[in-house]
Image (cartoon, rainbow, N blue to C red):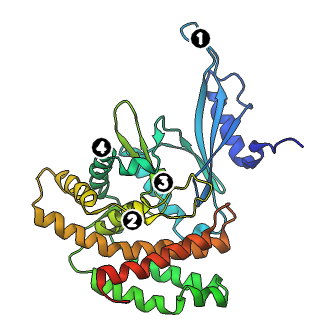
């Protein structure tokens, strides 16, 4: 039996957009001849690279391909974010020259410009040079003046996701993950963490797969704004640090290794570059204070993605062990809570 036709995964309304788009490009051999390449590592959507063979020219006799990206939204994931908000963010970022252009929309997805840069790997996040570039880019991202509400989303999002997790989980799951305790945990966290917050436009999902780098210019592009909103900047940085424990391109992509969480020296180095991106060298006490804030916000990151994993297990059919991922995030929450807040 032959392998399944990957192009069959592309919905008809998306295919029509792609063919029409390719027909307008004069150098495409056959607009109907879509080559579909699934891209690994996405856990909310299905993502495909679409290629067409281009006519060879006298200057360049070898046939080359033209590429775009198709993103098909995951089933049931609208509980996590407002899709229209995400599209508005996407279009705003495009106008700012910050991300790929939106080329078309269809019922359950969109067509995006294909960025000719490489997606970072898990190891890249620990590379001091690349980490410094990310730190500067993150500060630039946080300083964007996004149109619309500047209200913090984090706490309302957590409460909404707890409600949804309770709704979809079985009684044994609810017991194992202590869902009955979480509303009180969130309220206590909000009181303890919500003190000296610096608010910015946050990505809220800055894992390595959402960061692309041009190897020639060493410039960074941040992509995928589904979870983006105004939030405490410490939360966004904490979330990025937590993502260093993950590698979504292994045989066990759900397994986290917290030995890879950045040590004090690595965190200080990142935060010093981040703060210096505003044009002024930070003092040691400023770096230390931000580091302490970030460490506390790792708790919010563990809760967010623990709940995300638990809900996703019930609404998403992407091949990923969401429940085990959630289990690890909740386990990390209770351990980290003792460490940074001194209580269990």
Residue behind mark 1? 57
Q: Is residue 157 visible?
A: no
Marking on residue 224: 3
Q: Are marks 4 and 3 in contact (CB under 8 Å)?
A: no
Q: Quadrant of residue 272?
A: bottom left
Q: Residues within 10 Å of mark 2 (few under 14, many from 20)?
A: many
Considering the numbered disc 2 on the image, is that residue within a helix, a strand or a loop? Answer: helix
Query: In the displayed structure, does residue 209 sit left or right of residue 53?
Result: left
Pointer 1 or 2: first along the chain: 1
Marking on residue 239: 2
Q: Quadrant of residue 64?
A: top right
Pointer 2 or 3: first along the chain: 3
Q: Name the mark nearer the viewer: 1 or 2.
A: 2
Q: Nearer the viewer, residue 120 or 343?
A: 343
Considering the numbered disc 4 on the image, is that residue within a helix, a strand or a loop? Answer: helix
Q: CA distance from mark 4 to mark 2?
A: 20 Å
Q: CA distance from mark 4 to mark 3?
A: 23 Å
Q: Residues within 10 Å of mark 3 (few under 14, many from 20)?
A: some
Residue behind mark 4? 129
Q: Is residue 107 visible?
A: yes
Q: Name the mark nearer the viewer: 4 or 1.
A: 4
Q: Residue furthest front?
A: 259
Query: In the displayed structure, does residue 217 sit left or right of residue 245?
Result: left
Q: CA distance from mark 4 to mark 1?
A: 39 Å
Residue 283 spot, x, y in % from top left: 9, 60
**Quadrant of the drawing holding the C terminus:** bottom left
């Amino acid at each position: 039996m032959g392998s399944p036709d990957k192009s069959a995964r592309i919905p008809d309304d998306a295919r029509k957009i792609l063919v029409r788009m390719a027909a307008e490009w004069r150098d495409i051999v056959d607009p109907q001849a879509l080559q579909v390449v699934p891209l690994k590592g996405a856990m909310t959507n299905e993502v495909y690279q679409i290629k067409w063979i281009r006519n060879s020219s006298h200057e360049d006799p070898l046939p080359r391909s033209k590429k775009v990206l198709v993103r098909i939204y995951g089933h049931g994931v609208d509980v996590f974010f407002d899709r229209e908000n995400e599209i508005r963010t996407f279009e705003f970022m495009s106008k700012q020259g910050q991300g790929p252009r939106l080329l078309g929309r269809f019922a359950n997805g969109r067509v995006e410009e294909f960025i000719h840069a490489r997606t970072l790997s898990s190891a890249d996040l620990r590379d001091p040079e690349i980490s410094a570039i990310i730190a500067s880019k993150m500060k630039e991202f946080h300083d964007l003046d996004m149109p619309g509400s500047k209200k913090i989303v984090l706490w309302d999002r957590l409460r909404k996701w707890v409600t949804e997790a309770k709704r979809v989980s079985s009684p044994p799951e609810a017991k194992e993950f202590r869902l009955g305790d979480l509303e009180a945990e969130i309220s206590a966290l909000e009181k303890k963490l919500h003190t000296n917050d610096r608010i910015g436009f946050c990505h809220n999902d800055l894992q390595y797969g959402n960061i692309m780098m041009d190897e020639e210019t060493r410039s960074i592009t941040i992509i995928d704004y589904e979870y983006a909103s105004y939030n405490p900047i410490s939360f966004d940085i904490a979330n990025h640090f937590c993502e260093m424990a993950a590698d979504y391109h292994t045989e066990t992509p759900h397994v986290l290794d917290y030995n890879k969480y950045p040590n004090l020296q690595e965190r200080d180095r990142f935060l010093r570059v981040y703060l210096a991106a505003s044009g002024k060298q930070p003092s040691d006490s400023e770096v230390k204070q931000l580091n302490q804030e970030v460490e506390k916000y790792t708790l919010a990151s563990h809760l967010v993605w623990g709940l995300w994993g638990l809900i996703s297990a019930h609404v998403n059919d992407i091949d990923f062990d969401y429940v085990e991922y959630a289990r690890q995030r909740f386990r990390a929450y209770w351990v980290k809570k003792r460490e940074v807040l001194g209580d269990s």
